[in-house]
Image: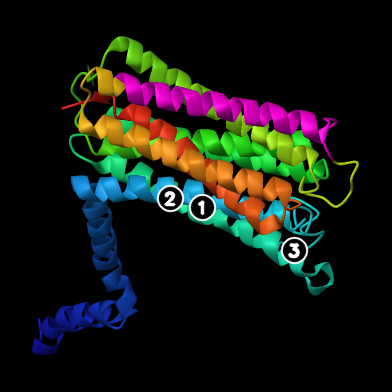
């Protein structure tokens, strides 16, 4: 065999290797990119939030649930509930407001957008609860309950728009929001304590009295939605879109329930004093009473001044604070280690 022939296989092999060398460089980078992507996924899976991060995520869910009630009140009080006349679009063929709809559509659309912020806050709470180690089943269940609450609220909100702000659906929308505030408050409190058995720090009778107080507070808020659904701030300028109650009668029923809540609060405070309750328990009941006094002052002022919208909005914000104060009283009577 000649020297030239002996070189031929080598040359042929080099020639065959050249296309691989001149191939697209991204082909070689593909496995590296995949490895980097896998590394990021692995880091996400291995993420373990601290207890403080979990606590803040749960607090964000509580704050978002409370804020959206206040902004929803602004929608109602400006008669902007039908600013976006369709759902899930703002108007036919457009997801966002158009100039012909006016400022009411911007107010309504902004409130809808807050739903995404609320969903993000609840999503953060879910992720924090899911990735915390050791995992705490109570936090996982409560955070997922809030997610399903958002889904339920989206359905109710859609029905409310499609029924042209039927006041009964508006009232249901508000009551479900209050329920979500209660769940998110419990979630936040549970994130700050251990998973040991519940320890009641007061007498059982007083615990039941606090439960009655929370239930009565919920009744006050529920009847309050009926009052608003009866008055000019029902959510739409059309007077036919109001509940068929006499304004004076439903307002009196609301006030009577408020007197019951005030009486229960005062009774609970004296009961704590008589049983040498913890200072924390006395503080929560005192704060509940102060919130009630503030709410009563706003309520009577708005009634005697012709229901100005800004005072009604303050009263709605106060309703959130009253509800939270009632839950604070109840949750202060038990602890976990």
Q: From the viewer's perspective, is the residue at label 1 or at label 3 nearer?
A: 1
Q: Earlier in the sequence, mark 3 or mark 2?
A: 2
Q: Residue 67 — which label?
A: 1
Characterize the magenta stretch by its predominant secondary structure: helix
Tell me the residue that label 3 is attached to: 105
* Residue span colored magenta: 242-271
Q: Position of residue 337 (x, y in %)?
A: 15, 27
Q: Is residue 236 magenta?
A: no
Q: How crowded is the residue under tag 3: few (<14 C-alpha within 10 Å), some, or many (20+)? A: many
Q: Earlier in the sequence, mark 1 or mark 3?
A: 1
Count of all numbered marks drawn on residues in the image: 3
Q: Position of residue 92 (x, y in %)?
A: 82, 59
| Above-or-below relation of 94 to 283 | below
Which residue is painted at 21% across and 49% down in the image? 52
Q: What's the CA distance linking mark 2 and mark 1?
A: 6 Å
Q: Secondary structure at mark 3?
A: helix
Tell me the residue that label 2 is attached to: 63
Q: Secondary structure at mark 1?
A: helix
Q: Is residue 221 left or right of residue 104?
A: left
């Amino acid at each position: 065999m000649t020297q030239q022939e002996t070189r031929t296989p080598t040359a042929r092999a080099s020639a065959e290797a050249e296309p691989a060398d001149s191939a697209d460089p991204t082909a070689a980078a593909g496995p590296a990119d995949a490895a980097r992507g896998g590394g990021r996924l692995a880091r996400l899976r291995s993420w373990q939030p601290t207890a403080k991060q979990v606590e803040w995520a749960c607090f964000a869910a509580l704050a978002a649930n409370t804020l959206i009630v206040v902004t929803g009140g602004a929608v109602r009080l400006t008669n902007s509930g039908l600013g976006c006349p369709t759902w899930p679009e703002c108007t036919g063929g457009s997801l966002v407001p158009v100039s012909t709809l006016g400022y009411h559509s911007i107010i309504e659309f902004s409130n809808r957008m807050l739903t995404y912020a609320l969903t993000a806050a609840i999503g953060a709470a879910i992720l924090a609860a899911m990735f915390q180690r050791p995992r705490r089943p109570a936090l996982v269940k409560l955070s997922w309950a809030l997610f399903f609450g958002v889904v339920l609220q989206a359905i109710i909100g859609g029905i409310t728009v499609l029924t042209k702000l039927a006041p009964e659906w508006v009232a249901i929308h508000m009551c479900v929001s209050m329920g979500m505030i209660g769940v998110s408050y419990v979630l936040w409190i549970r994130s700050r304590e251990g998973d040991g058995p519940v320890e009641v720090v007061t007498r059982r009778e007083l615990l039941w009295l606090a439960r009655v107080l929370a239930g009565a507070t919920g009744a006050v808020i529920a009847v309050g939605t009926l009052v608003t659904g009866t008055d000019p701030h029902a959510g739409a300028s059309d007077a036919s879109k109001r509940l068929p109650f006499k304004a004076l009668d439903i307002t009196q029923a609301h006030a009577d329930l408020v007197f019951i809540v005030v009486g229960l609060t005062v009774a609970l405070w004296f009961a704590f004093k008589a049983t040498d309750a913890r200072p924390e328990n006395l503080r929560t009941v005192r704060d509940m009473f102060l919130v009630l006094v503030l709410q009563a002052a706003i309520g009577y002022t708005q009634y005697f001044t012709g229901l100005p919208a800004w005072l009604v909005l303050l009263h709605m914000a106060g309703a959130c604070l009253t509800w939270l104060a009632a839950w604070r009283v109840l949750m202060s009577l038990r602890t976990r280690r």
